[in-house]
Image: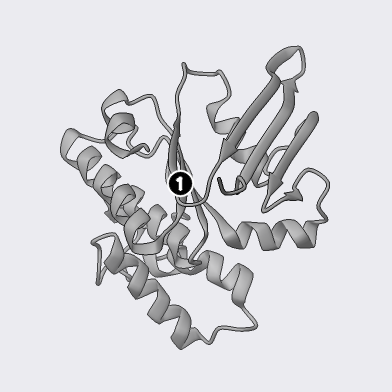
Amino acid sequence: MPEPLIRFKNVQKAFGEKVIYRGVDLEVYPGETITIMGGSGVGKSVLLKLLIRLLEADGGSITFHGEEVTTMSNAKIGQVRQRIAMLFQGAALFDSSSVADNVAYGLHEHYRYTMTEAKIAERVNWALSLVGLPGIEAMRPADLSGGMKKRVGLARAIAVQPEVLLYDEPTTGLDPINTERINHLIKGLKSALNVTSIVVTHDMKSAFSISD
């Protein structure tokens, strides 16, 4: 049995008097797709944000490749965020920037000294093609449908070629056709990129379609 890639052990989190976790345990293995389900407000998305330290755990241990995440330096967390990318629930695109600039955001953040602008443009094109949206680099988020925004957000996540993809409610607000398109992409990216995926969703059909 391989070692877990990601491990949560006795993780605790509260916001004021509202206790979210009293002791969460979770193991995620390389290459698998797991789905986290639950009602609204129970802390599904919080789990993803704790992993990449967008939120801080109140107690317990979170490890990635055996290294403790909760006590890492900011520089080390920056390296983790190159390897673990997240698709946010609302896609979280920058409205004032083009699609190309949105997709390139992580590349400029993490590889500004090691990738040329030509290489970045090439990677942006590759990522958009992978999500079925080639040639829309010059468009703005305001010009995109909800399904296209989700796919651009996904292109931004995969542009850094991560080991792990975190999906926060990837099909929320989408019509059935776009929901199926996103589910197909999640499964296709697992095969194409050999990524480990953690998906937060309340969509039962999606969960059974994409999960190991």
In the picture, measured across the screen, residue 83 lies left or right of residue 66, that is left
Which quarter of the picture shows residue 50?
top right
**Which residue is painted at 16% across and 40% down in the image?**
177
Question: Whole-percent x and y of residue 125?
Answer: 34, 74
Which quarter of the picture shows residue 1?
top right
**Which residue is painted at 79% across and 57% down in the image?**
74
Q: Is residue 46 visible?
A: yes
Viewer-nearest residue: 112 or 144: 112
Question: Whole-percent x and y of residue 194?
Answer: 41, 59
Quick one: quadrant of the C terminus? Answer: top left
Question: Whole-percent x and y of residue 24?
Answer: 66, 24
Image position of 24 with respect to 188: above or below: above
Which quarter of the picture shows residue 171?
top left
**Which residue is painted at 56% across and 18% down in the image?**
42
**For mark 1, does the 10 Å Cα neighbourhood hold few (<14), some (14 to 19), or many (20 or more) residues?**
many
Identify residue type, mark 1: Ser
The residue indicated by pointer 1 is: 197
Viewer-nearest residue: 14 or 187: 187
In the picture, measured across the screen, residue 17 lies left or right of residue 181, that is right
Image position of 55 with respect to 72: above or below: above
**Which residue is painted at 30% across and 30% down in the image?**
208
The chosen color scheme is one colour
Q: Which residue of the protein is positioned furthest toward the top in this rendering?
A: 17
In the picture, measured across the screen, residue 28 lies left or right of residue 167, that is right
Question: Whole-percent x and y of residue 40?
Answer: 48, 18
Q: Is residue 145 visible?
A: no
